[in-house]
Amino acid sequence: MNLILLSGGSGKRLWPLSNEIRSKQFIKIFRNEDGVYESMLQRVYRQIRKVDADASVTIATSKSQVSAIHNQLGEEAGICVEPCRRDTFPAIALVTAYLTDVCGVSPEETAVVCPVDPYVGEEYFEALKELAKQAQKGEANLVLMGIEPAYPSEKYGYIIPEDAEDISGVSEFKEKPSQNAAKEYISRGALWNGGVFACKLKYVQEAAHKRIDFTDYYDLYKKYGTLEKISFDYAVVEKEKKIQVVRFKGQWKDLGTWNTLTEAMEESSVGNAILDKKCRNVHIINELDMPVLAMGMQDVVISASPDGILVSDKEQSSYIKPYVETMEQKVMFAEKSWGSFRVIDVEKGSLTIKVTLKAGHSMNYHSHMHRDEVWTVISGTGKTIVDGMQQNVKTGDVIAMSAGCRHTVIAESELKLIEVQLGEDISVHDKQKFELEL
Amino acid sequence: MNLILLSGGSGKRLWPLSNEIRSKQFIKIFRNEDGVYESMLQRVYRQIRKVDADASVTIATSKSQVSAIHNQLGEEAGICVEPCRRDTFPAIALVTAYLTDVCGVSPEETAVVCPVDPYVGEEYFEALKELAKQAQKGEANLVLMGIEPAYPSEKYGYIIPEDAEDISGVSEFKEKPSQNAAKEYISRGALWNGGVFACKLKYVQEAAHKRIDFTDYYDLYKKYGTLEKISFDYAVVEKEKKIQVVRFKGQWKDLGTWNTLTEAMEESSVGNAILDKKCRNVHIINELDMPVLAMGMQDVVISASPDGILVSDKEQSSYIKPYVETMEQKVMFAEKSWGSFRVIDVEKGSLTIKVTLKAGHSMNYHSHMHRDEVWTVISGTGKTIVDGMQQNVKTGDVIAMSAGCRHTVIAESELKLIEVQLGEDISVHDKQKFELEL
């Protein structure tokens, strides 16, 4: 099975655990079978591997998520990087071109496209395999998954099938409705549209060439910034006549708000947390080192990360977005392909961060125009390169770098260091990358 | 007026803003007339100065609070340091001996003793002056303040006066009663015992010599650790026959729990905090750099410091003590006479802290057996002394110190530095102090 996972989202709704560069799919909140916390991305990837060990998985995502994906899945995950954010139609066109033109997949092959962040059981991935088989048959150009509604939600689009069979034609599509309209659709057998479908790659290719003037993947990539923002549903799905929907009856949850996310948590807390006996329906997700103590709370989610602290009534938490938008969105932590960093102190004229490099990894060889930096290695061993000069480093070593000097550190074992940045104009954009001069 | 302020308290009830070394009286939560936040200690000290500019104020406290008092009041505040914690009888005996034997105050003079942390208006300090005058007259050996009860509290002791006059004899004392008993006392004209009294110094001297075998202040200080833990109320007040109580009708609040403390706050939040429109009777005190967002909360206090985060129903918050006692009480921040420090990162084998020195101040000249340290100056100018060698330092300078080496830093302007401690056994107790070799 060719599986395309769409990984998007800006993550404002799950502040402070998601931010500009960490979307909800990266939050480690679920326990896997070994009791280790994993993110939605890791969970989905693990489930796919279990159901179909040979599945070819490609994640379509933006530049800002690439590091986090590599950090969580390792280097083997196939990634098709969107140079900037458009909508799902350009994204699916690009990843299709990537599969055919870069990976050499035949346009006759089928692909299944689905979002990276549904909270589902393994039967969902079995259903994806069935979807791919159905698309391969060629009875229809497009085979959708229709999810049996759990309640008359106002948040999803609805697919109204022609009949009540497991596989059926599609009579019409309905936008996010009012609750009453949703009830009426459901009485007519309507299914949720979870954005999951299967088709042959050539079908997307043709649709793409109809709307966009391009030769191949590389050309499309170059033009990507100029493309119209339009959803695949709107551009393709809703116009297709040769279309089928396959009924899915298993567990499917969209964990897009704190209310729905905490429903899926197996324990009442993750991280350093204490709940008193009067707490009822309280969930705490604490990514800070310090303890959180909750006393006498009901129906509340408490979430803490270096970005901030949320204390919210669960129902009320779905209205979080405008509040987060008013905040200064300084990224205080991030997972990178080489490890992670966390801002531990902010002052006028200085910024102190803790950097953790995974064994065998290194950061880019880079320089800054407007700041000096001081590294103090707090654990591990490795090698620094400063203006071309190599030096072995270990715990306790200090490296001072002036503005303009090129530098990197290569971790032998896992290596942690405290980096003090000094300058009047400290900015993440003040960074020039270079090829290593070894 | 000789005023003795008793500054005690371990501060578990106001966790995470109070801790082992920062009691509730040091929390900056009230605005003064200039809009600047001040602590209960600073507020009381300012009020005293306003009502009686010439008052001689001595703060009786334990070693652990001396730095914080100097930090908040400057060097001029008179402090009598208890070498260890006993109860109020030994403490009052010690401070009395301090006043007569060290400061040379005549035993014929009167002193007023009161706790450092009542939340009161200026009329309270006017009343203290009246209390002193009444004691000076010599009609009674001991003149108590009796606070007119606001409600039948179970938390205070009661004084039952002989009559309803402003100044009256005392008929009896009652321990913390049940609510019904409190109601009955109040119907008999009972007053709260706020632990405030005035008497001549020689009266305490005599009481002290009756119970304790000592010659003078220095002898008492030496024996302090061996003294019986007993309260002044129990040892002296409740046994005295020649005793009067002066009625106090003004504002008096004991801000000992989050519930009572937040009642006295003029604003709903201190620090970086956002409350949505659905919040009702919510108070946020946030000492962290990151924002706290509260949504849809009612009757809740949220408090955040480097020690931890509390989210509590206000009523429920009075039951906090046992929960705090189960926590590992690592001190993550402190105010010292020379400035302050804050732990910003904890790892196995390292601890990173931010140190802020006030202009003109320096830390002790000291060394550590089991850890190396690296300082990176992030702002200000000053001078370091390392094994006797002086060096001028400024922003960006790095000083590396091995275990065993003696070091200090003297701030010229306000000076901030990041200190990375490195070693397997990092402990606050691993510290040897030395005289400066200049």
Image (cartoon, coloured by chain):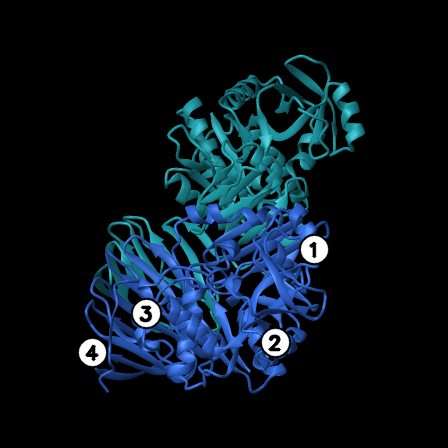
Chain colours: A cyan, B blue
Residue drawn 77% across the image and 24% down it: A183
- How dense is the environment of label 1, judged by Cα within 10 Å: few (below 14), some, or many (20 and up)? many
Element carrying mark 2: helix
Task: Please tell me in which quadrant of the rendered image residue A118 appears.
Answer: top right
Tags 3 and 1 touching, CB below 8 Å: no
Position above or below: A63 against B216:
above
Q: Which mark is residue B131?
A: 2
Instruction: Give, as a three-letter code, the residue at label 1.
Output: Ile
Instruction: Give, as a three-letter code, the residue at label 3.
Output: Asp
Residue drawn 39% across the image and 32% down it: A35
Q: Earlier in the sequence, mark 4 or mark 3?
A: 3
> For mark 4, what is the residue?
B387
> For mark 3, what is the residue?
B213
Q: Earlier in the sequence, mark 2 or mark 1?
A: 2
> Mark 1 and mark 4, same subunit?
yes
Q: State the CA–CA distance, disc 1 to disc 4.
A: 66 Å
